Image: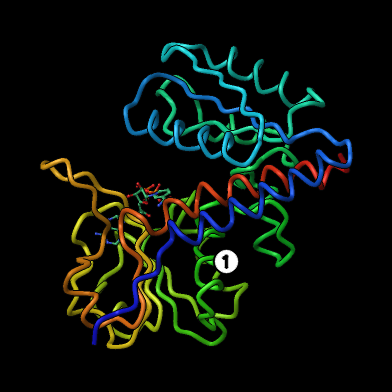
């Protein structure tokens, strides 16, 4: 068997086209464009690339992105003051703080200080809580992007045995909550899981989010399973790869996402949609 490759890039492009036309409709009816404040602290190369992609996507769909490129030794209190200002600014619809943040800044506190109605990353405890009680509003971009991607190729999630590898607040945990909401029977694996292989081997759906190149071997995958690889790892050669050994896994899976070109573009497209949604939910 050779798996069908899920082209996240193409699905995300379609999403961006739709978002662009929704924004154009707003403009035609005399409303303003959505606006997203993008905060980058320091010059971490990977973060700079992610932020650039997000800003380019804003440009593509007609979201006004406002750049806050801050020095790496900025004081926590200064960042709080900026967040407060953006929370109160009626012309700002979304606030994104690119992680990781430097060690003098408590990322958890920063997220908690973002007004949940402008939390377009879907990281605020309020938004995670709403997802947990099956009343989602602004949903974490990567996990929700995965759901949208699977829906768009008509994969029925209800009843699947899903295994999520990774339990971080930003990715693995909300991913498990999304799959639970979609009707899967969900197992969360993490660095203390005793036997990762046997968990993977019984999964109808594997979602990898560990950030470990080659962690999941192709021969572990149940024949006919769906494999979603969220991991982004840079090898010494400079090549980007996921957590799943793609070449061997694609011979067993029914569906598989590539890295790059799979989940990454869906994350960015979902961020754009969240920004538009945040504006609409505030009745603007
Ligand atoms: P993280 O380091 O915060 O969390 C990693 C998780 O993996 C932890 O819960 C840990 O327990 C688990 N883990 C680590 N080693 C393991 C092992 N050997 N077996 C089982 N579980 C193990 O990372 P994160 O922020 O959740 O990101 C995970 C990966 O997803 C990274 O590669 C990151 O770059 C990528 N990512 C991709 C996107 C995207 O849009 N595609 C978005 C965000 C993050």
Quarter of the image for residue 205 reads bottom left
Q: Residues within 10 Å of mark 1 (few under 14, many from 20)?
A: many
- Quadrant location of the C terminus in the rendered image: top right
- Up the image or down, 95 lies above or below 5; here it is above
Residue farthest to the left, as pictured: 237
Residue farthest to the front, as pictured: 28
Left or right, 178 with respect to 116, comes to left
Quarter of the image for residue 234 reads top left
Q: Residue at x 16, y 74 (%)?
A: 248
The answer to which of 1 and 200 lies nearer the viewer is 1
Quarter of the image for residue 276 reads top right
- Up the image or down, 144 lies above or below 236; here it is below
Left or right, 145 with respect to 279, comes to left
Mark 1 residue CB less than 8 A from any atom of ligand 1: no
Q: Residue at x 80, y 47 (%)?
A: 25
The residue carrying mark 1 is 178
The answer to which of 133 and 140 lies nearer the viewer is 140
The image shows residue 125 at horizontal and vertical percentages of 64, 47
The image shows residue 243 at horizontal and vertical percentages of 26, 59
The answer to which of 258 and 236 lies nearer the viewer is 258
The image shows residue 204 at horizontal and vertical percentages of 39, 84
Q: Residue at x 36, y 58 (%)?
A: 209
- Up the image or down, 75 lies above or below 238; here it is above
The image shows residue 203 at horizontal and vertical percentages of 36, 82
Q: Secondary structure at mark 1?
A: helix
Q: Residue at x 62, y 72 (%)?
A: 181
- Quadrant location of the N terminus in the rendered image: bottom left
């Amino acid at each position: 068997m050779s798996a069908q490759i899920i082209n996240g890039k193409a699905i995300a492009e379609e999403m961006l086209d739709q978002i662009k036309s929704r924004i154009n409709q707003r403009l035609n009816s005399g409303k303003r464009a959505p606006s997203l404040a993008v905060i980058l602290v320091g010059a971490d190369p990977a973060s700079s690339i992610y932020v650039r992609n997000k800003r380019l996507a804003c440009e593509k769909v007609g979201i006004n992105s406002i750049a806050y490129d801050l020095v790496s030794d900025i004081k926590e209190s200064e960042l709080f003051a900026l967040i407060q200002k953006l929370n109160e600014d009626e012309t700002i619809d979304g606030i994104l703080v690119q992680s990781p943040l430097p060690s003098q800044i408590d990322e958890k506190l920063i997220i908690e200080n973002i007004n949940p109605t402008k939390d377009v990353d879907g990281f605020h405890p309020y938004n995670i809580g709403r997802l947990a009680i099956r009343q989602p509003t602004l949903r974490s971009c990567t996990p929700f992007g995965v759901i949208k991607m699977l829906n768009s190729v008509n994969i029925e999630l209800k009843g699947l045995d899903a295994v999520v590898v990774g339990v971080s607040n930003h990715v693995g945990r909300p991913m498990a909550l999304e799959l639970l909401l979609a009707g899967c029977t969900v197992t969360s694996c993490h660095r203390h899981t005793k036997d990762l292989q046997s968990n993977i081997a019984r999964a109808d759906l594997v979602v990898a989010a560990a950030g470990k190149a080659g962690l999941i071997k192709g021969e572990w995958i149940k024949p006919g399973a769906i494999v979603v690889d969220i991991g982004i790892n840079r090898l010494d050669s400079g090549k980007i790869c996921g957590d799943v050994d793609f070449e061997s896994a694609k011979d067993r899976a029914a569906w598989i996402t590539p890295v790059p070109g799979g989940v990454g573009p869906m994350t960015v497209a979902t961020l754009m949609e969240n920004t538009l949604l945040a504006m609409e939910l505030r009745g603007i």
